[in-house]
Amino acid sequence: MREGRILLARRVNRQEIVRKFPRREDQLLPLLHALQRANPQNYLTPDDLRAAAEHLRLPLAAVYDAVTFYSMFSLFPRGRHIIRVCRSPTCHLLGAIPLIEALERELGIRIGETTPDGFFTLEAVSCLGLCDRAPALMIDGESFGPLAPKDVRELLTQYREVKR
Ligand code: FES
């Protein structure tokens, strides 16, 4: 019964979100971001993709293409906050690997996993455009760097306190 109520609430909420967007193709990415943000598990469901396609009058395949092209979208459940740590050449040379190891140790998870409390997902990505601050990472849209392994505990603790 409770599960049914949650599903109904998600459907109603989805339609409310979709209706806020003009029916134009250039609204696809903002709409997908809004739908993903509204999901407590931070991902897009098949129903989200269908709702976006119907509302914007786009083929479902075009919506699927966008979702699978951009790494900020996910088709699988994730944590509420996404840590994207860069491992491209500049960050790699300046310490991305020890930084990633410190993140994995502190979070108790590996790259691609979510903490048991669902708070953080850890992802390794290509250049974040923060090469002058390497090694760098982003949590949601916020950038941090240069970071050393010793900075990780304080960064995560502060982030948890602020975003709780
Ligand atoms: S190489 Fe890491 S931000 Fe560019």
Image: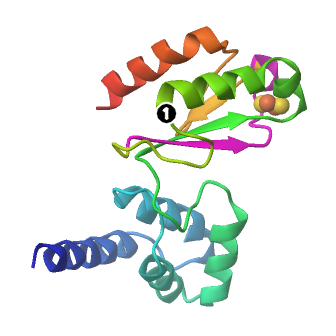
Residue at position x 67%, y 12% in the image:
148
Helix, strand or loop at mark 1: loop
Q: Residue at x 18, y 75 (%)?
A: 3
Is the residue marked by circle 1 packed among few (<14), some (14-19), or many (20+) residues within 10 Å? few
**Would you identify the image quadrant in which residue 120 lies?**
top left
Locate residue 126: give its quadrant: top right
Q: How is the image coloured?
A: rainbow
Extreme residue toward the left, this view: 1
Q: In the image, which residues are magenta?
A: 119-133
| Above or below: residue 59 compared with residue 11 | below
162 with respect to 130 (left or right): left
- Residue 123 in the image: above or below residue 107: below
Amino acid type shown at disc 1: Gly
The quadrant the N terminus occupies is: bottom left
State which quarter of the image contains the C terminus: top left
- The image quadrant that residue 8 belongs to is bottom left
Is residue 124 inside the magenta stretch? yes
Mark 1: C-beta under 8 Å from nearest atom of ligand 1: no
| Residue beneath the point at 48% across and 89% down | 54
Q: Position of residue 121 (x, y in %)?
A: 51, 44
Using the image as rendered, state which of residue 91 and residue 58 is in the foreground. 91
129 part of magenta stretch: yes
In the image, residue 67 above or below residue 95: below
Please name whichever residue, 40 or 115, is drawn nearer the observer in this view of the structure.
Answer: 115
In the rendered image, which residue does mark 1 sit on? 108
Residue 41 at x, y percent in the picture: 39, 57
Ligand 1 shows up in which quadrant of the image?
top right
Q: Which residue shows up at 44% across the image and 70% down it?
A: 21
User: Picture coordinates of residue 38 (x, y %)?
Assistant: 35, 60
Percent across and percent down for residue 115 are 43, 42
All told, the count of numbered labels is: 1
